[in-house]
Image (spheres, grey):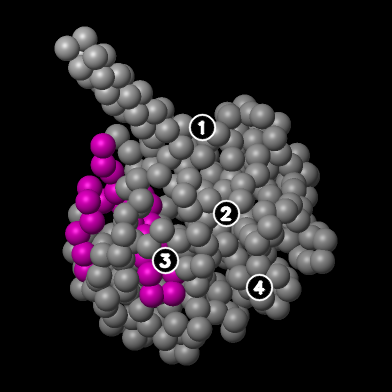
Amino acid sequence: MVGLKVRWALAAAVLFVAASCTSIFDSYFPDSVEYLQSQIDLSAELGGKPVASMTMRYLPSSASHPTDLLVIVASTTDGGTRVLFYDPSSLSKVASFTGDQLTAVNLGVAPQLNLIAQDATAIYTGEVTYTFPGPIIGPVTLPSAIPSSSDLAGFVATYAGVGVTIFQGQGSVLAANFASNYVDVPALTAINPALTLPYVSLLDAIALNSKYYLLIGSGSSASFVTGTTAVGTSDLAVQATVNPTQMDNSGGWVMAGTAVVRGHADNGTLLQAYSFSGSHLSDLRLEDNNQVFSLAFEPQGKAWYLFDSSTGKLSKNRPWW
């Protein structure tokens, strides 16, 4: 009888330890860890200062730069700013510019930086241009399509190899305009024919293989929109509309035929992947303890990138969908 009690006690202890280990593992190793391919300590590049905000975008190679680049605009809580360029394959640093350098090149005025774009001649972060090789930085006058304020919510600049299209959700309509280069895009106008959506919150847009892919939020729903770049924006059409879990209209990303919509679940961030036909592919949950997340996706869907301020790490990951 004593032996039986001992065995029951040992079994209970094993279960307790297993449960504890599971809890510890979940706390220190988030769901995304199984998709991790490589990572670097980005906080070291920022002087160990906490990140207040970050914008990150994957730019495919173009006539202005021979290789793909991951472009990051980071602001720290002490008011500092840094623009960084990384090789998205190896996460090796290509170039880095401080806020002082950017202000100096912008004639002593702190530049607006949060719209990342490119054309056939250069890469841009708002009012600063980067020409390769180098890169060499210089000032640029913002196109009329972009407001002079720092609020660029819903603005996305896409490059299709022949020119730049800038999109923006404006109330219940989607506005856009096109030019051969970034600095000459004129004021945006409503596309014709208009998309039939009750409210347009543009989350992301890319141009790839002569086709536009757009992700648009409308309240609790997300719409996947495509059109051919050969005819500008005149044939944009909704391919499917879905209702993601607790959708967050401040976050979404598109790739070729795939979209990732940001939602909320169990005090975390829920990344929900869909095909452009509306099929729900898979979800990934990220722990959310008031840290800053920034994400970017390779346009073909081969990799995705995550910065998590709780660790200070920038990671390259394989797809979870």
* Mark number, residue 254: 3
Q: Which quadrant of the figure has residue 191?
A: bottom left
Q: Which quadrant of the figure has residue 69?
A: bottom right
- Camera-near label (1 vs 2) is 2
Pointer 2 local density, CA inside 10 Å: few below 14, some 14–19, many at least 20:
few
Query: Does 321 sit above or below residue 104?
Result: below
Spot occupied by residue 264 in the image (x, y as percentages of width and height): 28, 43
Pointer 3 local density, CA inside 10 Å: few below 14, some 14–19, many at least 20:
many
Mark 4 element type: loop
Residue 122 falls left or right of residue 74: right
What residue is drawn where x is 26% and y is 65%? 280
Q: What residue type is labelled 3?
A: Val
Query: Does 73 sit above or below residue 309?
Result: below
- Give, as a single range, the part of the protein colored magenta: 241-266
In the rendered image, residue 257 lying in the magenta stretch gets the answer yes
Mark 1 element type: loop
